[in-house]
């Protein structure tokens, strides 16, 4: 498939991934109430740590590696089994840790079923090999499978979630989408690749772990200023404050998610081009930076001005407090749009994994400091300010690194790059 076809397929997918939850979100807020919605958001934020653990760095490192070896069936088979084995082991470790934590914290133990059913998200991430489909540039398959699973869960929410006490059921239904898509993907996978049943050697597993390590650290750091905002807010404030922030954050992230299809489609493409020509890959990223920057700036300005009516229409008057939060976070799509090209498309595709990882770790630490400083006084607004400041820091430092390494100028202006 061409890059254009992959982008179209992923836009359909991500449109569904963000639009369908926005369809159910007003219903859930009205049926469950902001407080129980906040409980679900807190559980999802906790489970997000285990998603990061089981995903390791494979969403990027494995995608990149598959793109490079997809013409070698034997090597590809060994790699697929290595990744699946590692992810399964990490999932089991994560489940044991979750059980131990929930049992040790009395307040969490009282709602243990909420955390256990939400853990289905981790299982879905393990058995759905998105990294393989992306590396093979078969995004249409991801779209069909994910969209079908999403539609099933959306229908199930409207049918089975009827009252406030159904919040555990609502969480389980939402978490099951990945499992349904993953089971279907396992049936489709043998049609896309010729699998030879070989047990991966320890050397294969070690190499796979090593290749994904820096990106795993980066993913942990990213989680420190994404899901951690909801999680720490839940620790320091009321479920109601979590509900206000989670609703506003979901709306902003849905808008920022417009970038994901471009990122996912271009990453393996740029990786392949960079192996042949640094100049050509930089030119692709230069055009992407300007186009994506202009588009996301316009989207962010629009989001700031329409935040009030959009929040009231989608969430109702009960969530009016989310309007100010959305306005504070409105420019996240623009900031993330710039950092995506600087970091993922450029730094990772040109061997700056360690610098990329260090930037995200440092920004994650800064975000935690801001959260613990601001949330006790400002609650949800403190979390909103923290995430914006952290994303600004990421973008600024990435620009400095690329300037020092000579990549920033050709990213901004058309010229010959000395490779």
Image: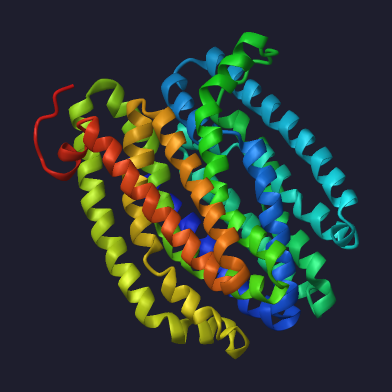
Is residue 283 visible to the viewer in this orientation of the structure? yes
- Which residue corresponds to the image point at 33% horizontal and 75% vertical from the top-left? 302
Quadrant of the image occupied by residue 256: bottom left
- Relative to residue 211, is residue 376 drawn left or right? right
User: Which residue is depicted at the point 69% across and 57% down?
Assistant: 44
Residue 348 x %, y %: 38, 32
Residue 23 picture location, percent across and down? 58, 74
Q: Tally the numbered discs.
A: 0
Quadrant of the frame with the N terminus = top left
Answer with the quarter of the image where residue 33 lies: bottom right
- Snapshot colouring: rainbow
Nearer to me, 104 or 260: 104
Horizontal relation, residue 300 to residue 97: left or right: left
Residue 337 against residue 82 in the figure, above or below: below
Residue drawn at (24%, 30%) of the image: 405
Viewer-closest of 39 and 315? 39
Q: Residue at x 22, y 37 (%)?
A: 403
Q: Is residue 102 left or right of residue 329?
A: right
Q: Position of residue 317 (x, y in %)?
A: 58, 90
Work out whether residue 413 or residue 155 is closer to the camera in this orientation and state it: 413
- Percent across and percent down for residue 346 are 31, 36
């Amino acid at each position: 498939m061409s890059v254009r076809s992959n982008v179209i397929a992923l836009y359909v997918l991500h449109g569904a991934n963000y639009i369908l939850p926005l369809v159910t979100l007003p219903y859930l807020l009205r049926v469950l109430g902001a407080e129980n919605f906040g409980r679900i958001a807190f559980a999802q934020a906790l489970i997000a740590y285990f998603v990061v653990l089981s995903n390791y760095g494979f969403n990027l490192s494995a995608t990149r590696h598959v793109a490079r070896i997809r013409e070698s069936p034997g090597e590809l088979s060994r790699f697929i089994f290595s990744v699946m084995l590692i992810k399964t082991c990490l999932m089991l470790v994560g489940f044991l840790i979750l059980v131990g934590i929930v049992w040790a914290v009395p307040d969490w133990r009282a709602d243990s079923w909420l955390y256990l059913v939400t853990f289905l998200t981790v299982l879905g991430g393990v058995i759905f090999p998105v990294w393989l489909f992306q590396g093979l540039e078969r995004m249409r398959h991801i779209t069909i499978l994910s969209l079908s699973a999403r539609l099933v869960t959306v229908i199930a929410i409207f049918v089975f979630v009827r009252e406030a006490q159904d919040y555990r059921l609502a969480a389980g239904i939402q978490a099951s989408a990945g499992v349904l898509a993953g089971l279907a993907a396992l049936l489709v996978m043998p049609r896309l690749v010729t699998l030879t049943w070989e047990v991966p050697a320890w050397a294969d597993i070690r190499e796979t772990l090593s290749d994904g390590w820096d990106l795993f650290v980066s993913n942990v750091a990213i989680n420190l200023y994404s899901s951690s905002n909801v999680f720490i807010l839940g620790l320091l404030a009321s479920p109601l404050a979590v509900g206000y922030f989670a609703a506003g954050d979901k709306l902003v992230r849905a808008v920022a998610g417009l970038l994901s299809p471009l990122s996912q489609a271009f990453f393996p493409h740029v990786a392949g081009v960079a192996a042949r020509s640094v100049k050509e890959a930089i030119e692709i990223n230069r055009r992407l930076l300007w186009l994506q920057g202009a588009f996301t700036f316009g989207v962010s300005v629009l989001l700031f001005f329409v935040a009030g009516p959009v929040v009231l229409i989608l969430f109702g008057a009960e969530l009016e407090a989310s309007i100010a939060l959305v306005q504070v976070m409105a420019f996240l799509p623009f900031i993330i749009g710039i950092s995506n090209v600087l970091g993922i498309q450029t730094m990772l595709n040109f061997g700056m994994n360690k610098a990329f990882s260090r930037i995200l770790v440092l920004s994650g630490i800064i975000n935690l400091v801001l959260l613990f400083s601001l949330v006790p006084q400002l609650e949800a607004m403190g979390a909103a300010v923290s995430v914006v400041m952290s994303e600004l820091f990421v973008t600024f430092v990435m620009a400095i690194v690329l300037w020092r390494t000579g990549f920033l100028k050709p990213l901004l202006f058309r010229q010959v790059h000395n490779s």
